[in-house]
Image (cartoon, rainbow, N blue to C red):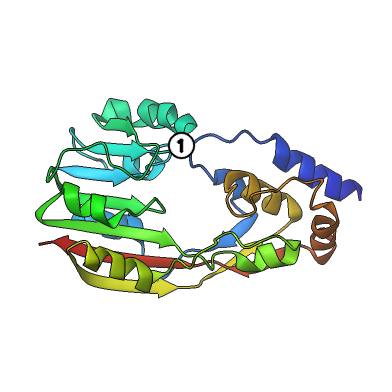
Amino acid sequence: MQEYERLVTEALEVPLRGWDFSWLEGRATGSDPSWSYPDLARAHLRADLLDIDTGGGELLATLRPTRGTIATEGYAPNVSVARERLGPLGVDVRFAPDATLPLDDACVDLVLNRHGRLNAAEIARVLRSGGELLTQQVGSADCADLNAALGAPPAYEEPWNAEIAAQALTAAGLRVTDVREEFPPLAFADVGAVVYQLRAVPWQVRDFTVARYADELKRMHERGGITVCAHRFLIHARGE
């Protein structure tokens, strides 16, 4: 088990900063749906833009946002990372610890939300008439096979999918114009990749520690990794 110990120790020692999964390059492959969220976001860019739950601002920075763009982030350690990256671009990064958006009513023309919290009423409130929402969400079936392999409880207590999200947005007064949903494969090449993923996404297995799940992780290592299904859905909507 020397190789197992090496892989696990390496994954535990990697610093977590922002929303950066570059350490997994070559070790975890897949999870991308057939559409490109960054390309779609670029096609919809407007001057008065809000990016919800921007993480460390990694994606937003690549979109070349205009000055005056607002980004919110709910995870306190990410706020300073996002400000460091986005501040020089003229982006106003605001801490939003709950689903309430710290913005005035009807103040933005485009809301971007990639894997962030989706509060339909708040999005409808801050969008101007005719404004747009583009969101890509992680559904509740995401990596459920990983939880099952570990014998861990499901990551989500309630179902979260495209139908439920679209219904919430419609009820809030938005007009849903595009809905897509896919379950692409996600392959973890080794147990170190799994450990890093569960550190970076702590809500997947909320009680995760290597010691608690050692037996299951060792079996996973002996099998040479694991392939699971991701769960992604995309919604575009307009304010009335």
**Relative to 171, is 212 above or below?**
above
Q: Position of residue 18 (x, y in %)?
A: 49, 36
Among the 4 quarters of the image, the one containing residue 132 = bottom left
| Left or right side of 171 for 218 | right
Quadrant placement of the C terminus? bottom left
Residue found farthest to the right? 1
Q: Position of residue 59 (x, y in %)?
A: 37, 45
**Relative to 224, is 24 above or below?**
above
**Total count of labels:** 1
Q: Position of residue 45 (x, y in %)?
A: 19, 51
**Relative to 203, is 29 above or below?**
below
Among the 4 quarters of the image, the one containing residue 124 = bottom left
Q: Residues within 10 Å of mark 1 (few under 14, many from 20)?
A: some
* Residue at (24, 37) in percent of width and height: 70
Among the 4 quarters of the image, the one containing residue 211 = top right
Question: Viewer-proximal residue, 99 or 14?
Answer: 99
In what element is the residue under mark 1? loop
Residue 35 appears in the rendering = no
Question: Viewer-proximal residue, 146 or 7?
Answer: 146
Q: Amino acid at mark 1?
A: Tyr
Residue 177 appears in the rendering = yes
* Residue at (54, 46) in percent of width and height: 21
Question: Viewer-proximal residue, 228 or 74?
Answer: 74
Q: Position of residue 4 (x, y in %)?
A: 84, 50
Identify residue for label 1.
75
| Left or right side of 138 for 9 | right
* Residue at (73, 49) in percent of width and height: 192
